[in-house]
């Protein structure tokens, strides 16, 4: 699982780059930190993704971000210059709805999260308590934790009260530690909230997003050929780990969470799997593509 070296694609020959491009049919890409940061696209990322599409690659956007529904992600991608449809988006808000629907869940969800999850649940007919304050509701049968910018002590308390009942399901979208940001601002990610609820409920959440089993099974059910699939990401412990666990090829870009310094640390400490290849940013791929 732990590789000892990573190929810097920028040091590869034109033949090797062409060989790399020929080696996959499907491209799975993370979004935050690979394609964009906040509402700004990362230079060249749209051109690179649109190039993949032009040369016939099948594309999926696989994000742990739970704040939006798939159509919102597709519109955001389109606004930033990417070609994208709703069917190509796999987000954790959608995964939560897909999971609960799949197990025949009929009770209500207590949501410590944002509107993205609320809307995806509504789309499959699953009731929830909403994202604002409410009293304890005897119909709640699951606590779902996603990113919630209005998180509060009362919400933790309420989640823990529901989870005191063993029958209450405990589901988390993802456990990313932080969001990719430019500059020195640190924005705590959903993992921060999941750990808090795990601590006060003394339970472990079932995590659906990258690199965990549910998103893996979901992707495997899409009929991908793992050996012919490339996973692109900016984090080793979610994106690259998912790719390695699924048997995909992996490309790490250094435009998001993982810096070159951290990559070196991961290599030395074997904290997470290493990618097959690395690039400073996705857009750098295009200048390496041999002219056809
Ligand atoms: Mg990312």
Image (cartoon, grey):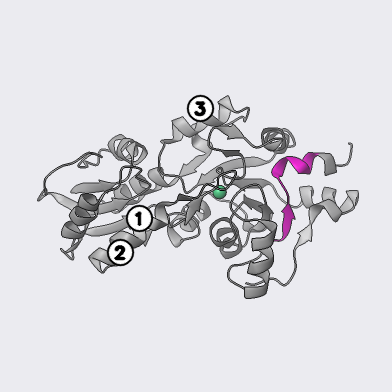
- On the image, numbered disc 1 is attached to which residue? 193
Name the N-terminal-most of marks 1 and 2: 1
Residue 267 visible in the picture: yes
Disc 2 element: helix
Structural crowding at the residue carrying mark 3, measured as other residues with C-alpha within 10 Å and reported as few (<14), some (14–19) or many (≥20): some
The one nearer the camera, 160 or 289, is: 160
> In the rendered image, which quarter contains the C terminus?
top right
Is label 1's Cβ within 8 Å of ligand 1? Answer: no
What's the residue at 57%, 31% (across, down)? 84
CB under 8 Å between discs 1 and 2: no
- Find the distance from the CA under tag 1 to the CA under tag 3: 28 Å
Tell me: 179 left or right of 192. Answer: right
> Residue placed farthest to the front in the image?
184
- Find the distance from the CA under tag 1 to the CA under tag 2: 9 Å
**Numbered disc in front, either 2 or 3:** 2
* Among the 4 quarters of the image, the one containing residue 37: top right
Tell me: 8 left or right of 64. Answer: right
> In the rendered image, which quarter contains the N terminus?
bottom right
Disc 3 element: helix
The one nearer the camera, 133 or 71, is: 133
Structural crowding at the residue carrying mark 2, measured as other residues with C-alpha within 10 Å and reported as few (<14), some (14–19) or many (≥20): some
**Numbered disc in front, either 1 or 3:** 1
User: Residue 29: where, in percent of width, then height?
Assistant: 60, 46
Is label 3's Cβ within 8 Å of ligand 1? Answer: no
Residue 88: numbered disc: none
**Range covered by the magenta-colored residues:** 275-286
Does 279 lie within the magenta span?
yes
- On the image, numbered disc 3 is attached to which residue? 75
- On the image, numbered disc 2 is attached to which residue? 198
- Find the distance from the CA under tag 2 to the CA under tag 3: 34 Å
Does 47 lie within the magenta span?
no
């Amino acid at each position: 699982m732990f590789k000892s070296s990573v190929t810097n694609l920028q040091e590869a020959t034109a033949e090797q780059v062409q060989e790399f491009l020929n080696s996959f049919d499907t491209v799975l890409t993370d979004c935050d930190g690979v394609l964009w940061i906040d509402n700004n696209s990362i230079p060249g990322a749209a051109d690179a993704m649109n190039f993949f599409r032009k040369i016939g690659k099948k594309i999926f956007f696989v994000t742990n971000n739970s704040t939006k529904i798939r159509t919102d992600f597709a519109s955001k991608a389109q606004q930033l210059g990417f070609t994208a449809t709703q069917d190509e988006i796999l987000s954790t808000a959608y995964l939560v709805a897909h999971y609960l629907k799949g197990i025949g869940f009929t009770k209500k969800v207590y949501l410590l999260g944002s509107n993205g999850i609320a809307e995806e649940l509504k789309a499959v007919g699953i009731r929830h308590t909403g994202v604002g304050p409410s009293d304890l509701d005897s119909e709640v049968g699951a606590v779902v934790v996603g990113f919630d910018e209005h998180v509060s002590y009362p919400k933790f308390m309420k989640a823990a009260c529901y989870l005191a009942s063993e029958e209450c399901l405990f589901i988390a979208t993802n456990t990313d530690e932080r969001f990719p940001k430019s500059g020195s601002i640190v924005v705590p990610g959903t993992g921060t909230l999941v750990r808090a609820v795990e601590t006060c409920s003394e339970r472990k959440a079932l995590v659906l997003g990258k690199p965990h089993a549910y998103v893996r099974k979901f992707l495997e059910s899409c009929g991908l050929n793992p050996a012919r699939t490339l996973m692109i990401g900016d984090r080793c412990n979610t994106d690259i780990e998912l790719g390695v666990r699924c048997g995909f090829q992996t490309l790490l870009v250094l435009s998001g969470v993982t810096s070159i310094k951290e990559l070196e640390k991961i290599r030395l400490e074997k904290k997470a799997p290493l990618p097959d290849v690395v690039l400073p940013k996705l857009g750098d791929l295009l200048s390496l593509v041999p002219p056809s």
